[in-house]
Amino acid sequence: MCPLFSPPLFMQRYQFVVDFVQKHEPKKVLDLGCAECSLLRKLKFHGNGVELLVGLDKDSSVMRTRMHSFAPLSSDYLQPRSGPLTIELYQGSVTQPDPSTHCFDLVTCIELIEHLHLEEVERFTEVLFGFMAPSNVIVSTPNADYNPLLPGLVGFRHHDHKFEWSRKEFQLWALRLCDLFGYIVSFTGVGSPADSHTNVGFCSQIAVFNRDPSRQDSALQCRSREEPTVYRLLYSVVYPSLSDNNILQRTLVNEVLCRAELIKRSWLSGEWVAKTAPEPFMQGSSVCVSLLDVWACPRVRSLCGTLRRFTEALMGELRVELTPARQAIIMPADEEEEEEVEEDEDAEAAGTKWTATTATEDWDAEMPHNSNSNLPDFHDA
Amino acid sequence: MDPNKPQFPGAPGAICTPDEALIGRGRSLLLPLGNASFGRGRGFELLANVPGGEFGRGLAYPDIEPSVGLARGLPLPSDDGGFGRARGLFLSAVQPSVGLGRGALLPMESSVTPPPLGQPTKPDLPQGMPSLQAEEEEVAKKSQDQVAMTTPGSSLVSMFRGMGIESSRTTWGRGIMPGVSRGAGGDFGVEPVKPQVGVGGAIGSRGDGLPNELMGRGGSWLGRGLGAGRATIPVVGIGRGSTLPFMLPPGPAAIAAGLSPPMTASPPKEPPVPTEASPPKGPLQMEATREPLLKVGTKGNPLTVGSNHIPIRCKNEAVYQYHVTFTPNVESIGMRFGMMKEHRSTTGDVIAFDGSILYLPLRLNEVVHLQSERKTDNQEIKIKIQMTKIIPPNSDLCLPFYNVVLRRVMKILGLKLVGRNHYDPTVAVILGKHRLQVWPGYATCIKHTDGGLYLSVDVTHKVLRNDSVLDVMHAIHQQSRESFQEECTKELVGSIIITRYNNRTYRIDDIEWSKSPRDTFTLEDGTQTTFKDYYSKNYGITIKEQDQPLLVNRPKERSKPQGKVITGEILLLPELAFMTGIPDKMRKDFHVMKDLTQHINVGGEQHTQSLKQLLMKMNTIPEAQTELARWGLEITTDILMTQARTLPQETICLQRASFVPSADASWSREVVREASISCVPLNCWAIFYPRRAASQVEELVNAFGKVAGPIGLRLSRPTHVELRDDRTDTYIKSIHSQLTSDPNIQLVICIITGNKDDLYSAIKKLCCVQSPVPSQAINVRTISQPQKLRSIAQKILLQMNAKLGGELWSVNVPLKQLMVIGVDVHHDTSKKYRSVMGFVASLNSTLTRWYSRVIFQMPNEEIISGFRSCLLGALQKYHEQNRSFPEKIVIYRDGVSEGQLKTVELFEIPQILKCFETYQDYEPKLVFIVVQKRVSTTLYSFSGDRVGAPPPGTVLDHTVTNRDLVDFYLMAHSIRQGCGLPTHYISLYNTANLTPDHLQRLTFKMCHMYWNWPGTIRVPAPCKYAHKLAFLTGQSLHSEPSINLADKLYFL
């Protein structure tokens, strides 16, 4: 197949979802029929506000192939993200309801329905719109009207396709379910024909559903996400983020200590320039660095927001020692370089055996088949 | 049979060749082992290969294949790229159904090619096997983990089963050094005398009209020469030395089997291969084993040690290797993968596939035909999967994909890959003050050592920084605005960074100041994009700072499996890269390092604990278990316990006194109380110091006077030169004028204030290159504490004596006319300067006089090419001093990585041997030992419940050692902090016939001889000297030191 579309059509479909996510900022996104999780992977990078990314597919082996690439990278630990992110992968069928699918802001079904038999589509529609009942749904499927433009295509675009709908059929399905479950739909697509005059629509047709606010079903609203009962959890990972209080605290303490150390050093070396903040002072052998000085650091500010929360966070923190008035951090002054323990010079050479070994060795003689030319040969008389 | 008996009665000269010697010893091992299981591979596989393709398969086709036959076989190997691979095949073959009669064919071979064996130059080659030679050479070139893929001659291989060759632990076949392989070939040569008879019979009995010249045909005569078979058995026995007796029992049965091929003739110990009766064509059989090399010593006291190796059990019976062909050919590897994927129903989920060779834990039919459709053009592609080999599950061939499994397991355990190792950020130690994180982790790998299959786990730590490279640049900018770029280059180039978006590690080779994220680069598909857009589009990352320069990484040229060659530069964004490792500046900071080493330097106790934790996780997390089970791997829960030895203690000799050092192998007290072996009287020396150090200098000189007596050093008062300031220039000018005005100055001492690298370099440059004189730089801080001054003065005095050519102490080395050479290489991390090889050679019998040279090489070129001039210089000097050349030369070569061993063997050693030809009739014995300090093997010793480091002199020469090398691990130094890290020694070449005991003890002795440290050190002293010399030259001098200093240890 020559590249009919650039970027390739599947990329365009993903981009469509990414754009949607960036615009509407859903917090919880579920991808049905996620296969190798390419869309989820894209959303991991581009879905800024997404807090929960879930993939579902009936084929666990496909999901497994690159599943572990969802693990956080080293840098995620070095600079934790600010918002939380959890990624979960489930094995299960889209035609079966499972309580773990409640409450999603967005459910995507990219090139999924055409792989289902028509009667399965019925059940799937019921599960998706009736049971999961997410706020938004994106469904994409091949547009049969476009098929004549695909060179050399006989039958369906993929051997596993059970049907390929025309625009009319797709819209009929969509409008009927809107009516049934209370959604509003808009139709669009990706991959327009090269010849824009041809009125065949997009190569991939896409329906975007929004739950109709005027028909809020109160029963649906109160449902919350629960543990899966039918689906099987394959993979789950929680990213380190500042929304985790422990991580926030740890990150803050590091920033504070680092900042305080810098201030201490510059003050000790006499390079400290008096600013508005109070100057460090000595207390015993320690240097006390004012909290306000540390607070001046933009990194510290961005972590805490307010000075009050900043001071609160440092109280009761064992790694940071504060002055009794909680005005300053006590930093121990550099101790002098420690030297290794000096050897005991006076001790007589006790323990040492002043013996000369008598046994002398000669490895040359020990050597097997040494054809050492130096050694005299023995001749039989 | 006497294993040491010359192997080539027909060609006595053969014994003298070094290779032969090796073999002789190798074989003697068999006797004690007695289990007969060595795949004399070399010779055989020849047979296996020659028949070529399907034709080799048996009687049915003998006449079809014109190019069959040994004699003709020659072209085959040469034009068949995969020939070397075939070699493994043969090894693997153990055919239950093949009779002994087949075994006889070997002797048949030799008979065909009548005894006056070959040309005298290649005595080990029976003429019948010219192709053997060709093949061996090929093998020598190939790396040992070649993939074996042979279609041809599989049945042939199987014949050896009849001879009782068993598959067990080891395999001989793959690219062993030429020496060994040749020797193996030589084994065949042994037989010619007797076999004649038997073979004759065999030939006769063939009776199928195959002309004699078809000898090599291998397959075709299999199973034919039955009668012969019987006759030949004894012959075979002769050939194989001791093994035969063990093998013989099945003999008669086998003969019968030979007659009626389908019958099974199983040898006493069946390898774990299904042994059902197999058709005459003979299905593939499992690889046979090979004999271990002779490397085990006996001297010393046994000691139970643990090592960071965990035995792995293989539950699969075998791993099956297939060759996959696509017709019409499919170029794209990716597409090939895709097609194989479609046939999971046939292959199962567990596969290892590289595009043409497929490994499965599953036995398919010998040939499987499948079909796929090429998506791009709907072309039907026929896929043929043909079994080529059955390998034992612990074969080296499996290691690559076992290690893939292992990496996956580490990932499953939640460990993060940084560089090559896995780390656990959840238990990171965070040093907030320094913005550092220390991640504990593991360097793991599955390897096949002398003891079998092991998981080797090393506990490592990664230092990562919370700062991006951009943060670091900002910090530098705040400190030094004027020299910003220069400072950045100094601090950053050479550092390893880890990218934020894909977790890759890169080395910063350069900084591109003229570029910014707004610049463009070309993507693989040819389109242009800016860095900014690229990161935003692919990773959703918004670049915050538009005016940052770009970091440059220049990867080493290498080719990807698909044949794509990677060259050129990689440009990276400072904002998106984190620093790793300890920056140089911090390295000099005592406090940071103290904080760090506390976490990094774990003792044996902690080491074994974290090791056990990992094993626990591996064995309890079900997903990890499943992953391992895919290839039938089971990792046991306990670390390896084995017997090591502690070598006999050495006696240290001073001038009059000699003594055995205390348990920690240190003699710092003795060496300052007793006279050194020889001292150079210090009559004329000068001391340079800035005014403010005047009092310390006075104290020091007084202290020198007091401590010199016991050491035996006669000392005059030095010339004091007080400098008006401590500028580099002032030092250099005064030293220079002093040296010019008084050419008799023996030694220059400089008192330096503070840490001044530039000053140090300048002084060394002056005193080592321009005006050669031994020099000693002393930091004023070290002599500022009166209570320590005495011991400091003693140490300095000893060092000065060594620099002047004095001899401090020695140990007795009972080898006459010996020269010991140490070699090490220093690489400049910034790659700004050339690498430097340091070369140090002993000049006298007590190994207390040393000759040293340096050679510069291109950046990061490890393999030494300038060896010649150094060695010749050393020989010349030796001759001057001893009136003779050394009989034995032992070279300790440091700084060789695992991958370079081959190159060292093929280039460096021949270059050395060639050197000797310079002198007429000079053929010294050479021992070449590679010294590897950075190894992952750790040793623990146990006393009660406590885990500690084994005592100095602990040697381990089996189980964890390399199957292809004569090697050992020796821990010569005393461990105060941390873990018992032994040094790995590999004897690549040994014509001096030093036994393992000698090699080990000589090495241990040499570890006592480093005069800068009154105790044992990790490496032999000449290596350490060479290291010091290379370091000084590479770090400070940047040019060759004066030859006038070559016979002194001026670089100490």
Image (spheres, grey):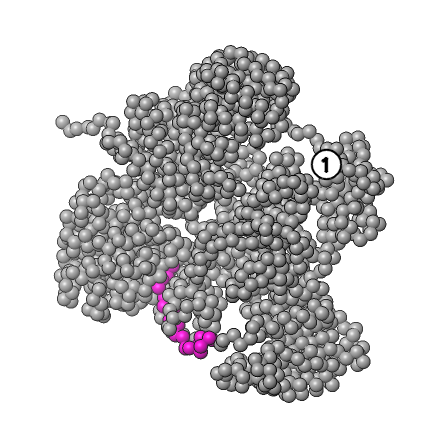
Q: Nearer the viewer, residue B721 or B19?
A: B721
In the displayed structure, would residue B967 be above or below residue A361?
below
- In terms of image quadrants, where is residue B967? top left
**Residue at the image position 41 percent from the left and 61 percent from the top:** B319
Considering the whole magenta stretch, tell me its main secondary structure: strand
- Queried whether the magenta region covers residue A361, the answer comes back as no
Residue B140, x across and y down, in percent = 32, 50
**Residue at the image position 57 percent from the left and 31 percent from the top:** B757
In the displayed structure, would residue B909 be above or below residue A245?
above
In the displayed structure, would residue B263 be above or below residue B552?
below
Q: Quick check: A271 left or right of B260? A: right
Q: How many marks?
A: 1
Chain name for mark 1:
A
- Queried whether the magenta region covers residue B379, the answer comes back as yes
In the displayed structure, would residue B139 be above or below residue B661?
below
Label 1 crowd bin: few (<14), some (14–19), many (20+), radius 10 Å: some
Magenta highlight range? B373-391
Q: Amino acid at mark 1?
A: Arg
Q: Nearer the viewer, residue A315 or B36?
A: A315
Residue B980, x across and y down, in percent = 52, 38
Residue picked out by circle 1:
A265
**Residue at the image position 46 percent from the left and 42 percent from the top:** B859
Does the rendering let one see residue B230? no
